Amino acid sequence: MRVPTSPNALAGLVLLLNACSSATSTTSTSPKPAEREESEFRSQYASTYQRKTNPPVFIRNATVMTAAGPEMQHASVYFKDGLIVSVGTDTTTPPADATVIDGTGKFVTPGIIDDHSHLGVYAAPGTWAESDGNEATTPVTANVWAEHSFWPQDPDIPLAIAGGITVIQALPGSANLIGGRSATLRLIPSRSVQEMKYPGAPYGLKMACGENPKRVYQRSGPSTRMGNMAGYRAAFIEAEQYRRKWDNWLKNKSGDPPQRDLKLETLADVLRGKILVHNHCYRADEMMQMMDLGKEFGFHIRSFHHVVEGYKIADVLAKEDVAASVWADWWGFKMESFDGVRENAALLQKAGVRAIIHSDSEDGIQRLNQEAAKAMYAGIRAGLGTTREQAIRWITANPAWALGIDSTTGTLEAGKHADVVIWSGDPFSVYSKAERVYNDGWLVYDRNDPAYQPKTDFNLGTGDPGVGR
Amino acid sequence: MRNCLHATALVALTIGIAPVAKAQTIAIQDGTVYPVSGPKIENATVLIKDGRILQVGPSVTVPADATVIDAKGKWVTPGLFHAWTDLGLNEVGSVPQTSEDTKSGDINAAFNVAEGINPQSVFIPVARTDGVTTAVSGPEGGLVAGQALLLDLSGDRIEDLISQNPVAMVVDLTSDSKGTGGGSKAGVYQRLRQLIKDADEYRKRTPDYKKNQMQELSAPAADLEAMQPVLDGRIPLYTIANRQSDIESAVRLAKDYHFKLVIRGGTEAWKVAKLLAAEKVPVVLNPLSDSPNFDGLSPRLDNATILREAGVPVVLIEPDRGNYRNLRFSAGNAVRNGMKWDDALLAITLEPARAMGVDSRYGSLETGKVANVVVWSGDPLDFASAPEHTFIRGVEISKETRQTELLERYKTLPPKY
């Protein structure tokens, strides 16, 4: 993993991040720190995710796109207890306890990962009541957490599951310079967001450049791009001081601990490299500024998002090891999106950037495979040498990396979580559908079986015919 | 306002015939031709002369002076017809200086967008990169938004682009227009009914109106005048409606006043498929709309399939204003959700032409029709294929767009400034 490590991480602070530091922790098993009762030493909104039991599954004779190597014909995928046991063309007889699925004519891919979603925070039916994505009251709201807005009954969630999505990053909106913490979630029906939180996933921080923050705050500021920059810098200057205070206290443990500040606590963990920065930024020149901001304060931007002009600085993004999360073809809705080209992902890929296709949309997330297909064929037509193996990574392995969970999901490899989609045909064809979606081995969606087509509470009694109809 | 019945400055722009350029003779040879008006023809030729289709079939004699396009192994279809766009009217979404599609006010029947069209819009070449050759472009906002036009997507001047003006009258019956009814849908319908009634009254008693020998009517004369082509059935009332009850109310209104209705949106149209089939009401819809909201709580992805199978004329659109080019993938997705392939192609060619009443000139490869033709590398509805040649009014159009120029500049870094 290339998660930036924090040189000064201290034992006491690990507790602050308990929610995302252990793959198995739940509230009940959280260690209770000795002698202290203050909030900073308690578990912070821990994941209560628990894998559902599901019989082992053996998919045979399918075209398997592992996202870790070449596409395999007549291959099988075997998973058990939520983990992939084997993938390959040489597997012999299926194990006796496995449900055998004939994959003839079908394609198998890793679960699709969308690293830019507002599901749950801008939920359907889209009234004011569900508008919980932008705390647009002041330009720096590093203190807010997307998971505290997230509504697990968003009726758009089952629609995305039916599109093969297994993991999302739910992000705050882009009204603010610093919008708040994101949450990396398993996309499963559940009663609470805690049950969806991907165990062990680091938090992300949403930042936004350009037109949105300078438009929202034009009266009180920032109202210019230089105002935006001054705003980020002021916030991180405070965070540096806060981090120093806490690190000193943790070293000496003498006297009362410093006053907690939620905003600075999050930003300090960005400086410690524990929280990954996800930065909404369209224009090439602005991304250059933001990478300089990172250098000023010693943090690394994990992924730029939207990146309509990414292709203009693909060489720099590759050198700086910043991922680029893009749409396949959105452009023209703002000045900063005026220079869109359909070859963006392919050009980034060619330069060696981790290209990612993201949705930022309750519609797009249902067909991220199609978005990747459009971008892939644009690259092929432009003679950029784009391959299917690259394109499948745009919606699986690469977003897994951006979210810091690539050691456990994002590819079909033995030992990884069984996040698996069976497609009716080539996922890069408009005609193909996700037929079965396994999330951590759990059959969460089956197009041919109404028993596996979850509906949210909101869907009930409204005449909504449900998913995939 | 009673006396402003003067013909508007748009007379020159209202001619209902596409200007046809004197162009060369072109023979698209040996392709698999999908005329849409009939079954596909293998190894067929499409002969184009002076902007019109001269002949289509397996045994067409190609004149010696014809430019020949070898279409062996290629698919040949009519140019795609996008039934709802804002092409030429809006440029960058967030920049009000580039927005021309909305006039303030609730009832804008007299609002004709023609002179707001910008033929130099950089969105037009992008829209046609994937085979869209013809588009309805129209206004939004209020209860009666105004008059939509039909454009062929090629030309330097407004007159060159416009093929039919007006082509439809746009009305919004979604919750977006509630304010125009004083905050209630019932108020919206009362107001619309009154407008139609007054337009009818105005038609019957125009001389009285001019002599001021009539009661006050609910809209200025220009608007009542503009409603006449709707009442005559010359252009459809292009009505945005999603909720089942709104669709039914629109049908009721159309029956009462005998006008031609086209529904756009149609989230819950599948629930009233029988009614729409019986009344022959076309539905213009985005086949990917499936997120519930209070304007339609029961959307479904196979809406188009259900409607088509019930006998409703179905027209498919792609709503992303930067990506009208993706119209063909809307049709592909309709197939994904159960529609027959031929029906999906019909829904982006001939069916929109019929809905807009221009099928004598558009929508299929038939003798005499406007030569909007696309030669595809393969299946036009899937991602792997792309147009190889696109003809608008018999002239092959360039593939160059702002985007191809950006690509060329930045294909290798540092850029070629």
Image (tube, rainbow, N blue to C red):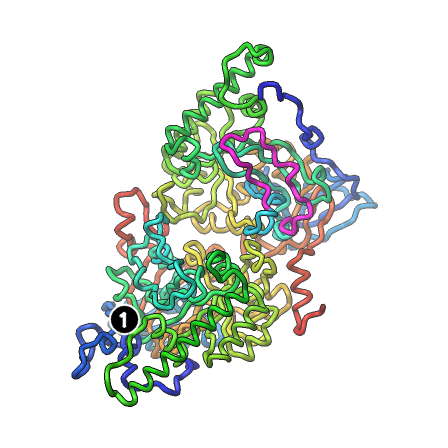
Decide if residue B189 is on the left or right side of residue B119: left
Counting labels gives 1
Looking at the rendering, the stretch of residues picked out in magenta corresponds to B99-125
Q: Is residue B52 above or below residue A298?
A: above
Q: Is residue B204 visible?
A: yes
Residue placed furthest toward the bottom: A252
Give the residue pinned by disc 1.
Answer: A56
Q: Amino acid at mark 1?
A: Pro
Residue B253, image x and y in percent? 44, 25
Question: Of helix, strand and loop, which one carries label 1?
Answer: loop
Q: Quadrant of residue A149?
A: bottom left
Of A131 and A241, the residue lying toward us: A241
Which residue is located at x 38 percent, y 39 percent?
A: B268
Asked whether residue A440 is drawn in magenta, I would say no
Q: Nearer the viewer, residue B99 or B62?
A: B99
Q: A92 left or right of A349? A: left
Q: Is residue B108 magenta?
A: yes
Q: Nearer the viewer, residue B35 or A347?
A: A347
**Would you place residue A250 above or below residue A170 in this image?**
below
Residue A105 showing in the rendered view: no
**Callout 1 environment at 10 Å: few (<14), some (14 to 19), or many (20+)?**
many
Where B43 sits versus B356, above or below?
below
Residue A193 appears left or right of A104: left
Magenta stretch, main secondary structure class: loop
Give me the chain letter of mark 1.
Answer: A
Task: Residue A51: give x, y in percent of width and height.
Answer: 25, 70
In percent of the image, x 54 and y 51: which residue is there? B94
Please tell me in which quadrant of the rendered image residue B115 appears.
Answer: top right
Q: Residue at x 50, y 60 (%)?
A: A214
Q: Residue A138: x and y, percent?
A: 40, 61
Estimate the x, y position of residue A290 in percent, counting from the top left.
52, 72
